[in-house]
Amino acid sequence: MAIMERGNAHGEARGQPSATSAGTSAATSPVTDQADDRETRPGGGRTYGDLLGDPQIRRWLERALLGVAVGAFVAFFFGLQLGVTAALLVVVVDVVRRARTSSSIAAWQKSSAAERRTEKQLKGLERNGYRVLHARAVPMDDEGVSDGRIDHLVIGPSGVYAIDSEKWDKRLPVRTLSHRKLFHGPFNKKDRLDEARWEAEQASRIIGAQVGFEVPVQASVAIYGPAIPWKVMRVRDVDVYAGNRARGYLRRRPKILTATDVERIYQAAEKSLPPNYPE
């Protein structure tokens, strides 16, 4: 979860247009002409510009154009049948690729690629009794180190986890020192680990107050990019592992919560930790 500055968008109030003079004919008004023209268009008055402005329609149009271009190229050199097959394959591959990289949560479409990759892994755990909340807000610390958001809050049979997804430069190695320091190349990640731990502690305190008993929340960081030379390493009380191990990290732990516990904690977390989606 990257630390960022957020700004508020401010819109200016718009005044009402002045009334037209008595000598101005409504029939000559460009707004009236446009409205009348739209009423005569098929499809409920949507113009071609409106259709192209629809993200889904525009995406399918782009797929179709790319498929036609690739299909025509292949057909020219290898025949019509292979050209049609290539065109269809291009469309299918693009549909699958976008499905894998898009978020299942509409309001979280601006999440990072690392967050979406972790989200996909966690979704597969739902059938094993896990519940997941994404982008949940927690209070910032006094020094403003934490940006006040947990990327993924996971509640399941093996416990409660606050997972932050990170994309680091794959060219720099990752190493630890005495389970107290984490380095990415020459960069000390102490602040990043302290941030993750602080967020987990805040989630534990807030959820515990809701349910009336202690709810430990384990902080962890899922790293994408560089090779991680261990399966799971606890550094400064934060579990650190390669991003593609997120699902295995949770499943291999012993069960400590019942289905009733999981649901109760999930409901409390959903109520007390509101969503904080990227803007």
Image (cartoon, grey):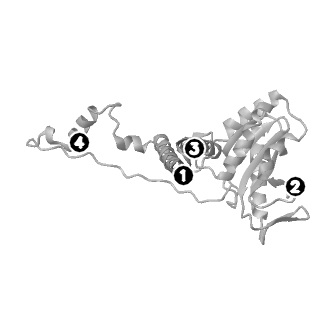
Residue, x 86% and y 60% (percent of image)? 229
Q: Where is residue 35 in the image (x, y as percent from the top left)?
A: 25, 37
Which badge, 4 or 2, comes first in the chain's sequence? 4
Q: Which of marks 4 and 1 is in front?
A: 1
Judging by the rendered image, the residue that carries numbered circle 1 is 77
Q: Nearer the viewer, mark 4 or mark 2?
A: 4
Residue 31's disc is 4
Task: Name the outermost residue toward the top.
Answer: 260
Taking 11 as reference, is 116 left or right? right
Q: Does the residue at mark 4 contact the one at mark 2 (Cβ under 8 Å)?
A: no
- Marks 4 and 2 sit apart, C-alpha to C-alpha, by 65 Å
The earlier-in-sequence mark between 3 and 1 is 1
Residue flagged by tag 3: what amino acid is it? Leu
Give how far apart the Cα atoms at labels 4 and 1 are: 52 Å
- Would residue 137 be seen by someone viewing this image from the given angle? no
Q: Please report contact status of discs 4 and 3: CB closer than 8 Å, yes or no.
A: no
Residue under circle 3? Answer: 82
Mark 1 burial class by Cα count in 10 Å: few <14, some 14-19, many 20+: few
Crowd rating for badge 4 (residues with CA inside 10 Å; few <14, some 14–19, many 20+): few
Whole-angstrom CA distance, mark 4 to mark 3, is 50 Å
Position above or below: 139 against 226? above
The nearer-to-camera label among 3 and 2 is 3
Gap between marks 2 and 1, in whole Å?
57 Å
Q: Earlier in the sequence, mark 4 or mark 3?
A: 4
Residue that mark 2 sits on: 234
Kind of residue at disc 1 = Phe
Query: Which element carries disc 3, helix, strand or loop?
Result: helix
In the rendered structure, the answer to whether residue 277 lies left or right of residue 186 reads left
Between 278 and 110, the residue placed more toward the observer is 110
Who's the residue at 24% across and 40% down the image? 34
